Image: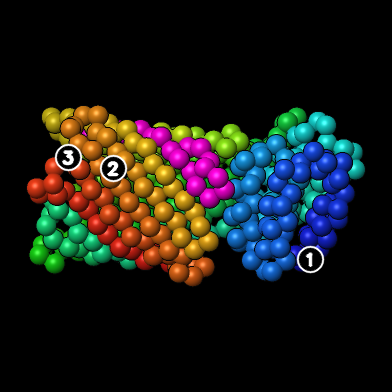
Amino acid sequence: MTLFKHLRPALWLLLSLPAIAIAETDWSEELTAIQQLQADGNVVQAVIDLEALHSQNPTAARLKLELAVLYLQLNQPDTAERYLADVLADPDLPVRVRINTQVLLIQAQEAQTVSDYQFSSYLELSAGQTEQTNSGYAQVGGQGQLLLPKTVFYSTRQSYTVRPLIQVTALSRYYPDRTDSPWLGRLEGGFSVRNPSAIVQLTLGLQHDDTLDGWLGRAAFAQSMGAFRVRLAHDQFWHDQGLESDSRAALSAALGTRSRASLFWEGEHRRLDANTTTDHDLGVGVSSDFATWETEFNLVQSLTRDQLGLENRIIWRVAPDWRLRLRVDLTDLTETDPLSYAASISLRWTP
């Protein structure tokens, strides 16, 4: 089934929207600019701008339908399906719009049967230096993820998409002045459950590195609530010397169309043989996403040590499949002699 066949009912649907768009005129100029980006062939930037506009107007059915059309154009029918299902959950949707949306939803679901299995991967080369080791290093890492055929469950209000996954991760680091080369490998399996505004992902697998072997369990949750987003994550590694766990909770809010402010907590627990350590950090940050640049700056206060750190990240989208990232972390701003830091530069290829 061709892309044009999917887009014909989508474009016809947008022409039938005046009944639900009359009261949604405060963002009409922004939408016109986004539609011009689409007309000029810059669909990716149109999606970025439209997602930002939608985060500020989460109940606007017109924006959800516009997003569905763009994602169909990008050959991402699963994402288009989530927005269409969210529109259909509105009990006050006009009959004509509901019928056309249902037709488009069927088109999106049929498009996904062509590619029930989806594989994604990346390869990353890095180089860096830390004050703790006082030497540089080089690192190569990569990850591959296979998404298996999904199952969609429908309730009276929304849909839930369950999708199994298999994930493989590997990395190796080289220090010029050391004889050993730390490395790590993971094999994980699990599943994700997604609805139009939230996702839960659970995985369990094996982790093996140059010193430890064991089981790795991971859980992650993300929820969008208008301009706000909540993210929770927990990793637990059980091995023959004890266990290690890392947790994170973050709340972010939109600042305009391209930036977000965040408040987060991070916890780390280590039990190795008879030694147990626990660390907690509280931080605030600002991240921005421009046409080809991403930036993130976080101020982190340790709750267990007298340290105030600064994390700085800049990502440049060199090409559609290539990203160059510069990271500089200052571990403790209260102590400058010596200055504790970690710096790295990496190039990631996502084919």
Which one is earlier in the sequence, the residue at label 3 or at label 1? 1
Q: Position of residue 87 (x, y in %)?
A: 75, 40
Quarter assignment of residue 323: bottom left
Looking at the rendered structure, the secondary structure element under dot 1 is helix
Amino acid, disc 2: Gly
Q: What kind of residue is marked 3?
A: Thr
First-in-chain label (2 vs 1):
1
Residue underneath mark 2: 214
What is the magenta range? Answer: 252-270
Q: CA distance from mark 3 to mark 2?
A: 37 Å
- Give the numbered dot on residue 109: none
Q: Measured from the top left, where is residue 212 in percent x and y?
A: 22, 46
- Quote the CA–CA distance across marks 3 and 1: 60 Å
Q: Residue at x 27, y 59 (%)?
A: 344
- Note whether 92 is above or below 207 in the view shown: above
Q: 285 or 351, which lies in front?
A: 285
Is residue 351 visible to the viewer in this orientation of the structure?
A: no
Indicate which disc residue 4 carries.
1
Q: Position of residue 144 (x, y in %)?
A: 44, 58
